[in-house]
Amino acid sequence: MSTIGGIEIYPLISFIIFFVFFLIVAILVFKESKENIATMSHLPLEDGTTDSLKN
């Protein structure tokens, strides 16, 4: 791999892209309101079906 010219920049670019993505996700998670998180945490428990489908 050392014979390819300019290959040493790709790990650095990959790390920068990952780090920026991680920071954006972390900022969005910390800025999210507690009420919205509580609402979303109950969504998997609500199936949205009616009792008539249980036959």
Image (cartoon, rainbow, N blue to C red):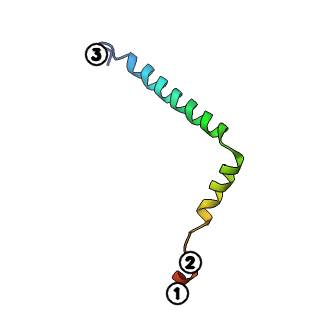
C-alpha separation, residue under disc 2 versus residue under disc 3 = 62 Å
Q: Earlier in the sequence, mark 3 or mark 1?
A: 3
Residue 48's image quarter? bottom right
Pick the front one: 21 or 48: 48
Q: Is residue 44 above or below residue 12?
A: below
Q: Which mark is residue 4?
A: 3
**Residue at the location (58% across, 81% down)?**
51
Amino acid residing under circle 3? Ile
Amino acid residing under circle 1? Asn
Q: Secondary structure at mark 3?
A: loop
- List x then y, in percent, for residue 22: 55, 32
Q: Earlier in the sequence, mark 2 or mark 3?
A: 3
Q: Is residue 40 above or below residue 6?
A: below
Q: Earlier in the sequence, mark 2 or mark 1?
A: 2
Q: Answer left or right for 7 relative to 52.
A: left
Residue 25's image quarter? top right
Q: Secondary structure at mark 1?
A: loop
Q: Which mark is residue 50?
A: 2
Which residue, given by chain and number where applicable, does mark 1 sit on? 55
- List x then y, in percent, for residue 46: 60, 66
| Quarter of the N terminus within the rendering | top left
Residue 11's image quarter? top left
Tag in front: 2 or 3:
2
Amino acid residing under circle 2? Thr
